[in-house]
Image (cartoon, helix red, strand yellow):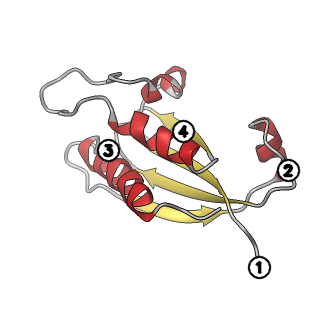
């Protein structure tokens, strides 16, 4: 599958913006973007075909993080974990990220811990040569 560059660009803009927006006070934000090994069990857990090749992209930060029970809620439209004025936004950024991933026939998963940071895992199908 080919990617739609403007959508992938938007995906990274939203994820990086969130990492900066939810950085811990008095701490330099650190954002790591990389590719990680993927197992067929991970693909099966998503209910996908393990015979399809996927790339796993991880976007990790050292921000404020959040509790595990919010890991799926954050993708709901207009859902905001923080209601304070210092964390601006519409509550649509992660909803759009999820839609972009789904539009590319992929999957998305988030892992987070309060005061430790967040990792967003994006799985996208690709054609190996």
Q: Mark 2–mark 4 contact, CB under 8 Å?
A: no
Mark 3 or 4 closer to N-term?
3
Mark 2 or 4 closer to N-term?
2
Label 1, label 2: how many angstroms apart (C-alpha)? 17 Å
Residue 80 at what x, y percent from top left? 32, 24
Mark 1 or 4 closer to N-term?
4
Task: Name which residue lies at 34% across and 38% down.
Answer: 93
Name the image quarter holding residue 83. Answer: top left
Label 1, label 4: how many angstroms apart (C-alpha)? 29 Å
Residue 109 at what x, y percent from top left? 59, 39
Label 2, label 4: how many angstroms apart (C-alpha)? 21 Å
> Of tags 2 and 4, which is closer to the observer?
2
Q: Which residue is mark 4?
A: 110
Residue 85: give its label: none
Q: Mark 3–mark 2 contact, CB under 8 Å?
A: no
Q: Secondary structure at mark 2?
A: loop
Q: Secondary structure at mark 1?
A: loop
Q: Secondary structure at mark 4?
A: strand
Task: Name which residue lies at 32% across and 44% down.
Answer: 18
Residue lying farthest to the bottom in this orientation: 129
Label 1, label 3: how many angstroms apart (C-alpha)? 34 Å
Task: Name which residue lies at 48% across and 46% down.
Answer: 100
């Amino acid at each position: 599958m080919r990617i739609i560059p403007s959508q992938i660009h938007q995906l990274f803009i939203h994820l990086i913006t969130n990492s900066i927006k939810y950085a811990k006070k008095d701490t330099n934000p650190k954002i790591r973007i990389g590719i990680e090994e993927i197992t067929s069990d991970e693909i099966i857990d998503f209910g996908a075909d393990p015979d399809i090749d996927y790339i796993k992209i991880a976007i990790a930060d050292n921000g404020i993080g959040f509790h595990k029970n919010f890991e799926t809620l954050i993708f709901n439209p207009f859902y905001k974990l923080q209601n304070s004025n210092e964390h601006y936004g519409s509550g649509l950024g992660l909803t759009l990220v999820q839609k972009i991933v789904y539009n590319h026939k992929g999957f998305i998963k988030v892992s987070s811990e309060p005061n430790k940071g967040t990792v967003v895992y994006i799985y996208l199908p690709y054609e190996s040569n």
